[in-house]
Image (tube, helix red, strand yellow):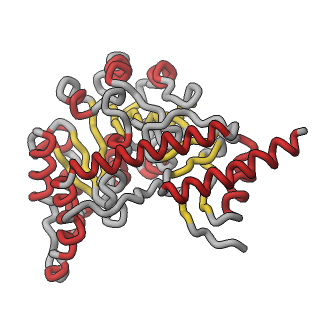
Amino acid sequence: MTSIVHQLSLNENFAPALPGVREAAEGTLGTLHLTPDPFSTELVKRIAAHHEISPDQVLPGVGSGALLQQFLQVNAGPGSEVVHPWPSFEMYPLLIRNAGATAVGVPLREFEHDLDAMAAAVTERTRVVLLCNPNNPTGAVLSAEQITDFLGRIPEGVHVVLDEAYLDFADSGTIANGLELLRTDERLTIARTFSKSYGLIALRVGYLVAAERVLAPLKPGAMFFRVSAPAQAAAAAALEATAVMRRQCAEVAAERDRLRAGLRELGFDVPPSGGNFLWLPLGADSEAFVRHCAAAGIGLRVTAERGVRLTVGTREVDDLVLEVAGAFAAERDGAAR
């Protein structure tokens, strides 16, 4: 059996570590026997200054997934519903069930959020609506105008969470910036992470941005989901290297578009993506494609039973992907004749 050499199913960032991050994390190793700041006070100040918002609007945690779980535990529960797009982040249904609520998955229209259907799915039992921008796994992007229009159709008592885990890989001229929308609509809560664009996935650190009244009910439990000292230090250093991060994300986006163009030339249907991944809606061929790639040492998996999400790798690895995908397409087309 061929071992997996190139793992492209986890949306990891293969760019070099940002300057100062490793040194900042290592600088905390002498105090590993001491309790870290349970409220990440310095990191909160750095995030607030970075976004020009109040520290009271920031809640850090051990990754955006854990923060979403905290948010749902407080704002949803038995008898309530949470509306979300589908397919989208695979953990949404699990997080919702963990909170005791009912997940209401609304099918995408083509590869994008069906905002009309999502608005129609909101009932008197709906407490939270989740939006994923860019959407994972399809890469579709929502504009500020689309989200503003959607908010206009959502009842006042319903929270709308905008998951922006992959925001930095998208074209800033086309994708909504949740922090700007939040300035005019306090129903929004923004979830961001240092795992993807900042490359700190192993340290597990993210944050929510929302109105102080929205975050206040979450803060009493925050000390039980505290960010480690190395993660706090590394995230603060990463913010200082945001300019480098943006250059790296632009390089990933360029490689993503090159890989997409190559796959389309091979006959694959690959929609545009604003993330560091591509969506291959292969349907019944999904499992066969995953097995074919595994035989070449490329790790992928079927997502939402509808297709395969492919993380953008290095140029060398992506060239291998194109070679393997070309062989798969030739075999498939040959069998169809």
123 over 315 or under it: above or below = above
Q: Position of residue 263 (x, y in %)?
A: 62, 42
Is residue 20 visible to the viewer in this orientation of the structure? yes
Determine the residue positioned at 32% across, 41% down: 75
246 over 274 or under it: above or below = below
- Near-viewer residue (203 or 224): 203
Q: Residue furthest right?
A: 337
Q: Position of residue 273 (x, y in %)?
A: 48, 37
Is residue 96 visible to the viewer in this orientation of the structure? no
- Near-viewer residue (246 or 145): 246
Which quadrant is home to the C terminus?
top right
Q: In the displayed structure, does residue 65 sit left or right of residue 179?
A: right
- Near-viewer residue (315 or 162): 315
Determine the residue positioned at 70% across, 48% down: 326
Q: Position of residue 304 (x, y in %)?
A: 60, 45
Which quadrant is home to the N terminus?
bottom right
Determine the residue positioned at 27% across, 37% down: 189
Q: In the displayed structure, does residue 274 sit left or right of residue 289?
A: left
Place residue 291 in its image quadrant.
Answer: bottom right
Q: How many marks?
A: 0
Determine the residue positioned at 14% across, 57% down: 43
Q: In the displayed structure, does residue 47 sit left or right of residue 278?
A: left
- Near-viewer residue (14 or 108): 14
Q: Position of residue 42 (x, y in %)?
A: 9, 58
